[in-house]
Structure formats: structure tokens, C-alpha cells
Amino acid sequence: MKEAYLESSAPIMPKSESSRQPPFFYKWLSLKKRVLILGDGKLAHDLARVLVYDRSHRYNVMGFLSGEQSRVGSRLENPTVIGTVDQLFDLSEYYQVQTIAVCVEDRRGGMPLEALLDVKSMGIEVVDGHRMYEEECGRLSIDELKPSFLIFSSGFRRKPVVMVLKRIGDILGALFGLAFLTPLLCVIAACVKWDSPGPVLYRQTRVGLHGYPYVLLKFRSMRQDAEVDGVKWAEQGDTRVTKLGYWLRKLRLDELPQFINVLKGEMSLVGPRPERPHFVQDLRKQIPFYDLRHTVRPGITGWAQTCFQYAASLEDSHVKLQYDLYYVKNLSLWLDVKILFRTVRVVLQGSGAR
């Protein structure tokens, strides 16, 4: 019933005062928040996908409003384009909308400002589409993101007291980790030496705070000649990985020597995972706002590592950056603690490693 109604080729508008009540089946959806998406571009499409497939089932997307009459009735996600932006007030009242997500790409000429003021005065929540997307899926949509959103955003603030406490936590955490795990580190080092020829520690140049390079330490998990043919992404079932290295990577034990990088001030316990200069040069050309991830110290673990798979392609890095920018924008001690707890779960599950 619901899908057939939303797939109609023309907007459903009230014809009289007696027909202003929405269709009867909305009563069954009273526990869900009714959302109307203003716009029909990529951000609107991505936001609808997040809301429609939200596992908590908190939202009911009524449909999209387009700037073009010809698009009315076309399907973007499960809901369709049910009207134009000029019909915002009437459709909001008719569908008893509780939230309007503004996803209009051209906000200088395509925003129905008077209608938005009218619906806001009626008590309907009007939210920015980027902000709603960020809150619902824990990442920033960067494809249609305007620099003004970042400039005037309330995030990206670095309170000195937070950064000092974060650094103190890094030092204490690294010291405790090295002291507590010393027996395990010795066992791993002996096993790496026994498993395959080559050094125990693998030293690799990574890009750190403000884009400066540093040498990252890891237990070697690949053959000594792993990059004889050049630098490339690690693949699923990578044949360069040793037998012991497979388990070190799966349990993230190869990352433990990076406690030394943390003590040296090159890394933090929590932050965006550092990339190699070879990849950074390509990624910053193809992914917008990429260098914003370098405004904080890279971390042994991060928000992207607990929410997303291993990034082994341009597409993966594109999604990973969305999570990294969410962390950079919302950096706090509480978020760091949350990430550390989620990291324990990820390690125990052995997910996302390659």
C-alpha cells in the first residue's frame, strides 16, 4: 500500500479541508519520524539510503522534492519524487512531516526560503542534509560538501585542555602497553625471526601530522621481498603475507610496536590511520578534503578502522576518509574512549584485516 502510493506519477495534494488528513496507513507509522527530503541530487539519494535502511527503523522517508516538474514520480530510492520544491509547505502539512532535510545542491537559487520559514514556524524541524547524514551514519558526505559547511561548522575545534589530556593519555597508554605486553612482544619477535628470513621490525615511511613524513614501526608480516615489484595495496588473501603474518594482521598484533611512535609524539593511540606517501599523492588529487585528516596525529586505531573494512582501493579510501573526517570534526576524549572499546571488539572478531 505504502510503496504503491509513493510511486504515483504526480504529487498527492489535498483538494479540500476535509481531505487534509494523511492516508490512514500513516497511523501505523506513528512511531517513526516522518522525513521529507528537499532535493534530488546525490546527497539526497545517499541520505535516503541511510534512513530507509536504518536498522533501528526510526525514520519513514515520505519522498523527495525536486526543482524540476519532469522528475516528479521518478524513483531515487524506495520513496520517489512526490513533488517540487514549490509545494514544500502544502506537502509538509499534508503528510504531517516532522523533519525536513535540506539537500538542495544550488542553495543560492533553489532554496524556497519563505516556505522553509513557514514550516519552521509550524514546529517542523529543518535540518541540513549533510549534518543529518553525519549524525545518522557516523561519517561526512564529502562529494557534495561545500567548503562553507566546514568553515562555519561548530566542529573542528581543538580545545587546548582536550589536546593536552589526549597527549597525556597517549603517553600513559603507550607506557602501560609496552610494560604490560613486554613478554608478548618478545614472543612475537622470536616467532617472526623463526617464521621467515628478514628483520623482526618493518620500518615504513608514513604521512603524519601536518603532512610530515615519519618512520612507522610494525612487526614484519610479509616476505622480505614483498615490494620488489613496487608499492601496491594489500589484497584479500595476499600471497606476500607469511603464515605467522596472517595471524599477526588478523589480531592486529603487528601494530604493537607503534607504541614507540606514540611515545615519540609521531602518533596517537586514536586517530586516522596513516597512509604511505605514494598513496597520499594520488588520494589527495582524487578525493576532496583529503588533507584534513592530517590536521591531527595519526593513530594506532581510529574511527574508520572500527566502522569500515580495510581500505585497499581508491573507492575504499573515499569511504574511509568520510569516517576520518567525522573523527577530526568531532574529536573528543569521549569519542576516543568509545573507539578504544570498539577496537577491542574488532580485534576479538578478527574482522577487516588483510
Image (cartoon, rainbow, N blue to C red):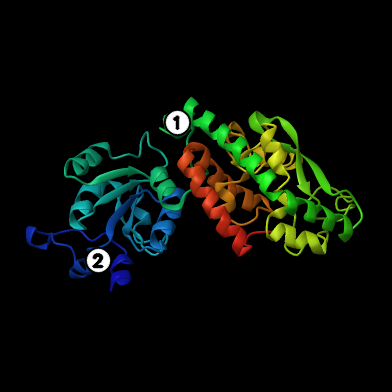
Instruction: Residue at 80%, 62% (x, y): give it.
Output: 244
The mark found on residue 148 in the picture is: 1
Residue 313, given in percent of the width and then of the height, sits at 68, 53
* Any part of residue 299 in sight: no
Quadrant of res 110: top left
Residue furthest to the top in view is 160
Extreme-left residue of the structure: 18
Number of numbered discs:
2
The image quarter in which residue 91 lies: bottom left
Foreground: 15 or 38? 38
Mark 2 residue element: helix
The residue indicated by pointer 2 is 29
Residue at x 53% of width, y 48% of height: 339
On the rendered image, what quadrant is the C terminus found in? bottom right
151 to the left or right of 73: right
Left of 6 or right of it: where is 271? right
Residue drawn at x 64%, y 62% is: 350
Residue 184 picture location, percent across and down = 73, 54
- Under circle 1, the secondary element is helix
Residue most extreme to the right:
197
Q: Quadrant of residue 78?
A: bottom left
- Residue 155 horizontal/vertical position (percent): 44, 34
- 186 and 195: which one is in front? 186
Query: Which mark sits nearer the N-terminus, 2 or 1?
Result: 2
| Residue 266: image location, x then y, percent | 68, 33
**Badge nearest the viewer, 2 or 1:** 2
User: In the image, is 219 to the left or to the right of 283?
Assistant: right
Residue type, numbered disc 1: Ser
Looking at the rendered structure, the kind of residue marked 2 is Leu
Q: Is residue 107 above or below residue 347?
A: above
